[in-house]
Image (cartoon, helix red, strand yellow):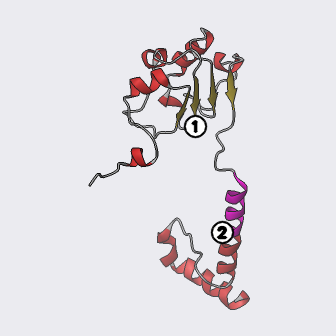
Amino acid sequence: MRRWKPAELAGAELVSLEELLSSADFLVVCCALTPDTKYLLNAPRLALMKPTAYVINIARGPIIDQQALTSALQQKHLAGAGLDVFEQEPVDPADPLLSLDNVIVAPHALAWTDELLRGVGTSAIESLLAVAAGKLPKYVINRDVVDRPGMQAKLARFGAGYG
């Protein structure tokens, strides 16, 4: 009986990074920044890419050697780039990367969706109502505060007054 691997189930073929870079039309970077991925895309690896290829970085800036990327874009060794992260943040307004006409930049705001904003508002209101009723909010970051006498007294006072 054949066991399917996750890549096969998704219709993908696993290849080396070098093969991927040399064949990609669009490369979307979305890995974690670790010591192993810092400058994962450096000058030699960017040189493997087709001059018609686009690099899109939505992960972390230092995964790409920004100076090497700028050079590849200036020399038209790459068709373009879409970036919402930079090696140094905030990016220097004088950075030559920002003046290139084959680069699109955007704020790193993937999470700022209607769903996120609605969820944040709902969570805040639920927390306020819980405290007003003398109860502990669902999401308490500093759990050590919960057992302090002052916090317990505040919850009891709110519970008596508004609960």
124 with respect to 140 (left or right): right
The segment highlighted magenta reads 113-124
99 with respect to 144 (left or right): right
Where does the image place residue 37, in percent across and percent down from the top left?
A: 41, 32
Mark 2: secondary structure:
helix
Q: Main secondary structure of the magenta part?
A: helix
Q: How many marks?
A: 2
Identified by mark 2, the residue type is Ser
Q: Which residue is mark 2?
A: 123
Q: Residue at x 43, y 30 (%)?
A: 38
Q: Is residue 31 above or below residue 135?
A: above
Q: Is residue 115 magenta?
A: yes
Quadrant housing the N terminus: bottom left
In the depicted view, which residue is nearer to us: 129 or 154? 129
Crowd band around label 1 with a 10 angstrom C-alpha radius: few (<14), some (14–19), many (20+): many
73 with respect to 98 (left or right): left
Q: Which residue is mark 1?
A: 58
Where does the image place residue 124, in percent across and percent down from the top left?
A: 68, 68
Work out which residue is located at the far top of the displayed protein and give it: 75
Identified by mark 1, the residue type is Ile
Where does the image place residue 114, in percent across and percent down from the top left?
A: 73, 56
Q: Residue at x 67, y 64 (%)?
A: 119
Q: Is residue 97 magenta?
A: no
**In this view of the protein, can residue 139 be seen by the observer?**
yes
Mark 1: secondary structure:
loop
